[in-house]
């Protein structure tokens, strides 16, 4: 992709189908129903990010939420970047932009789940932890056999924090 300006905004329900198509084009991400993506883009838009080029191409999406029983923790559900926008640090920029929002003022921890084979996500969250000056802890969140009946790889819980600084804008 030629260098186009990318805008980061809160998604809306009209982005649901674009989110669905983007995630489907980004293996190994798990696809969800369009309805789920509509909810992510509307009900969870305060803790989600849509990325578009100046020509309107939908090139990135981060979904997340503040955990109901741990209001100092942002759980990042999915991070998707289109092939055309990779290599520009967009994933980190999207997560960083979430931390700058008023809803995340009290966030001291970031959590996500990652399968062992998703090296892109591991690299992203290790880089975030380093830039935030925070530790990264890993444990099993959902086990392949116990939780997925052998049908999905184990999801490792990644916990970053406590966060004492914001990520430098790049």
Image (cartoon, rainbow, N blue to C red):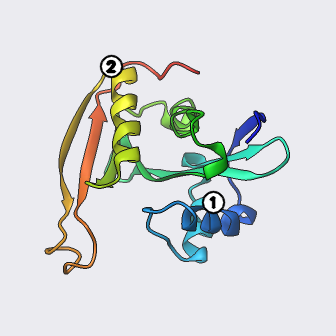
In front: 105, or 48? 48
**In this view of the protein, which residue sits in the foreground, 36 or 60?**
60
| Vertical arrangement, residue 72 with respect to residue 32, above or below | above
- Rendered location of residue 49, percent (x, y): 61, 46
**Residue 152 percent across, percent down from the top left:** 28, 73
The image shows residue 50, relative to residue 93, as above or below, that is below
Secondary structure of the residue carrying numbered label 2: loop
Dot 1 or dot 2, earlier in sequence: 1
Q: Quadrant of residue 35?
A: bottom right
Label annotation for residue 140:
none
| Tag nearer the camera, 1 or 2 | 2
- Residue furthest right in the image: 55
Q: Quadrant of the N terminus?
A: top right
Mark 1 and mark 2 in contact? Answer it, CB < 8 Å.
no
Q: Secondary structure at mark 1?
A: helix
| Residue under label 2 | 133
Q: Quadrant of the C terminus?
A: top right
Number of disc labels = 2
- Distance between the alpha carbons at the discs numbered 1 and 2: 30 Å
Name which residue lies at 41% across and 18% down. Answer: 165
Classify residue 101 as left or right of residue 134. Answer: right
* 136 lies left or right of 33: left
Residue at left 20%, top 78%?
150
Q: Residue at x 33, y 45 (%)?
A: 111
The crowd level at tag 2 (other Cα within 10 Å; few <14, some 14-19, many 20+) is some
Residue found 61% across the figure and 51% down from its top: 83
Q: Position of residue 128 (x, y in %)?
A: 40, 30
Asked whether, in this view, residue 13 is left or right of residue 134, the answer is right
**Residue 125 quadrant:** top left
Q: Is residue 65 left or right of residue 139?
A: right
Residue 141 screen position, x and y as percent: 21, 58
| Residue named by callout 1 | 41
């Amino acid at each position: 992709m030629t260098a186009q300006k990318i805008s980061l905004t809160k998604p809306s329900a009209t982005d649901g189908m674009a989110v669905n198509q983007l995630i489907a084009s980004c293996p190994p991400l798990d696809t969800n129903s369009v309805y789920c993506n509509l909810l992510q883009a509307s009900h969870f838009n305060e803790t989600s990010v849509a990325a578009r080029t100046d020509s309107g191409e939908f090139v990135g999406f981060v979904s997340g939420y503040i955990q109901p029983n741990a209001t100092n923790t942002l759980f990042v559900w999915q991070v998707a970047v289109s092939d055309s926008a990779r290599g520009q640090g967009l994933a980190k920029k999207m997560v960083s932009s979430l931390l700058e929002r008023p809803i995340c003022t009290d966030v001291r921890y970031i959590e996500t789940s990652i399968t062992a084979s998703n090296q892109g996500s591991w690299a992203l969250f290790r880089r975030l932890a380093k830039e935030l000056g925070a530790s990264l802890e890993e444990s099993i969140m959902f086990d392949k056999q116990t939780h997925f009946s052998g049908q999905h790889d184990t999801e490792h819980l990644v916990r970053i924090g406590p966060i004492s600084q914001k990520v430098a804008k790049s």
